[in-house]
Image (cartoon, rainbow, N blue to C red):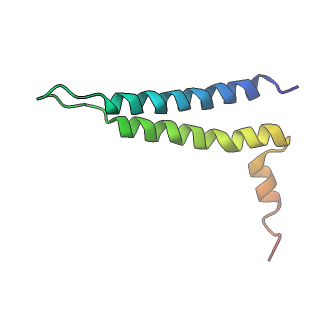
Amino acid sequence: MPGPDFFLTLIIMFTGLVVILLAGWWAKKPRVPGTIRWVSPTAIQFAALIVIVLMVPHLVGLLGGQDFVAHMSANRSMGR
């Protein structure tokens, strides 16, 4: 049974997806003429996408049962 880290990782990934969708909805709304957006919706989407991409190796490590970085460093000499 996966531990709390597994569910927390899924919650963070799901929250990132929700942020991407909300920022996309916000970007499609018409702006009030003469005003500017101080934060770009595209920048918000990009930051949320980075969070999701960083969570993928963590999720793979949780499901695989082995630390991804330790696995890659142990196999560095393979294939030379």
**Mark count:** 0
State which quarter of the image contains the C terminus. bottom right
State which quarter of the image contains the N terminus. top right
Q: Relative to the observer, which residue lies in front, 80 or 27?
A: 27
Q: Relative to the observer, which residue lies in front, 21 or 61?
A: 21
Q: Relative to the observer, which residue lies in front, 20 or 8?
A: 20
Direction from residue 74 to residue 34 in the image, left or right: left
Q: Relative to the observer, which residue lies in front, 71 or 20?
A: 20
Residue 60 x/y as whole percent: 75, 43
Residue under the image location 84 percent in, 44 percent down: 66
Residue sticking out furthest to the right:
1
Residue under the image location 81 percent in, 53 percent down: 71
Task: Give residue 40's quadrant in the image.
Answer: top left
Residue 35 x/y as whole percent: 15, 28
Direction from residue 42 to residue 16 in the image, left or right: right
Residue under the image location 67 percent in, 42 percent down: 56
